[in-house]
């Protein structure tokens, strides 16, 4: 019985590993786009926060 369970586990593991392929060019391009969007979002968010800080500082003077 243990041999059957072990065999089933090894077959399942082999199938899972066979399904893991290298990333194709479309997937790589998609990941680059995702990183670009994240970087842009971070940059814009930082710029907005800096602008808010400058407005707050300017209003504190009055």
Image (cartoon, rainbow, N blue to C red):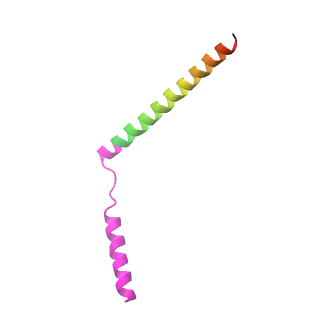
Side of 42 relative to 53 (left or right): left
Residue drawn where x is 34% and y is 79% of the image: 8
- x then y, percent, for residue 15: 31, 69
Does the magenta-highlighted stretch encompass residue 18? yes
| The C terminus lies in quadrant | top right
Q: Residue furthest bottom?
A: 1
> In this picture, is 38 found above or below 48?
below
Side of 30 relative to 49 (left or right): left
| The N terminus lies in quadrant | bottom left
Q: Residue furthest right?
A: 61
- x then y, percent, for residue 12: 34, 72
Residue drawn where x is 45% and y is 30% of the image: 40
Does the magenta-highlighted stretch encompass residue 52? no
> In this picture, is 61 found above or below 48?
above
Q: Quadrant of residue 4?
A: bottom left
Pick the front one: 19 or 62: 62
Q: Quadrant of residue 22?
A: bottom left
Q: Which residues are magenta?
A: 1-28
Residue drawn where x is 38% and y is 43% of the image: 31
The overriding secondary structure of the stretch rendered in magenta is helix
């Amino acid at each position: 019985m243990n041999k059957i369970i072990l065999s089933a586990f090894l077959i399942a593991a082999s199938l899972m590993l066979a399904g893991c392929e290298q990333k194709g060019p479309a997937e790589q391009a998609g990941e680059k786009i995702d990183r670009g969007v994240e970087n842009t979002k971070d940059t814009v968010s930082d710029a907005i926060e800096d602008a808010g800080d400058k407005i707050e500082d300017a209003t504190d003077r009055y």
